[in-house]
Image (spheres, helix red, strand yellow):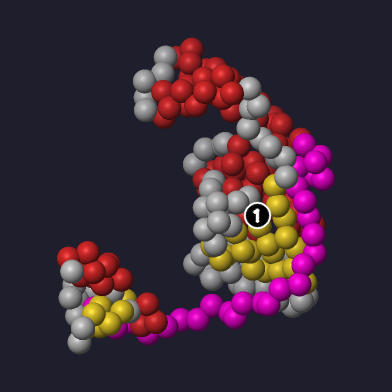
Amino acid sequence: MDCFIDTDFKKAIEFHGHRCPGLAIGYRVALIAIDCFPDKSQDEEIVAIVENNSCSIDAIQVINGCTFGKGNLIFNNHGKHVYTFFGRDEDKAFRISLIKDLSISNSSSTSKNIELFEKVRNGNATEEEIKIHNQMKDKKILDILNFDTNDLFKIEQVNMKIPKKARIYPSIECEECKEHVMEPLAKKSGSKTVCIPCYNEKDEQS
């Protein structure tokens, strides 16, 4: 299959650790974003708002330069393949949403595929089952990489309020565990200022 994969997708695979359909979706999204914003984000020039935490996000980090560490990758946990990119200097934003159903329509086949996936993941699959699973996975990856863009995604320019740039906040010591926590994320627990895990632990005990 490697002969059908371009250099940039190989970079995404290397970063992610393996190739999979989710990464292929993210790669296609990343390519659309490049069409909208050609230069890879060195700092916060391009910001991505992603609505899932699937494998797809790793491709966006590698290809578009939108990362959690730089603060230009914003995660909204909506469980949707929806990705919005905007350029701070260009004052425009594009929303990319997956519109093609990539699941297998036949329910019995779906059940068998899920069972096979679980066997492979748990290390209980035979060599033949692993081979079949990998063939199915590679076929789906190639399908995703070769679908016409307009059949796979809805792309629309949108108006949105641009989030503020990432800020660096001071840290303070949690009065329970003594670990340091970012100041705006600290909580008040009675008279003490504590981190979120300690606050939740106190809440569970009460």
Label 1 SS: strand
**Which residue is pictured at 42% across the width and 14% down the height?**
126
Query: According to the image, label 1 marks what residue?
Result: 82
Q: Quadrant of residue 125?
A: top left
In the rendered image, which quarter contains the C terminus?
Answer: bottom left
Q: Quadrant of the N terminus?
A: top right
Which is nearer the eye, 80 or 40?
80
Q: What is the magenta range?
A: 147-174
Q: Is residue 148 above or below residue 132?
A: below
The amino acid marked with disc number 1 is Val
Write down the quadrant of residue 22 in the picture: top right
Task: Describe residue 12's horizontal placement relative to residue 6 as left or right.
Answer: left
Q: Who is closer to the viewer here, 25 or 44?
A: 25
Give coordinates of residue 94: x percent, y percent. 75, 63
The relative height of residue 200 versus residue 181 in the rendered view (above or below) is above
Residue at horizontal 62 percent and vertical 55 percent from the top = 60
Could you tell me residue 175's position as x and y percent? Answer: 19, 80
Where is residue 56 drawn, in percent x and y? 59, 48
Q: Dot 1 surroundings within 10 Å: few (below 14), some, or many (20 or more)?
A: some
Question: In the shown orientation, is residue 33 left or right of residue 197?
Answer: right
Q: In this rendering, does residue 78 appear at all?
A: yes
Q: Residue at x 52, y 23 (%)?
A: 111
Q: Is residue 69 magenta?
A: no
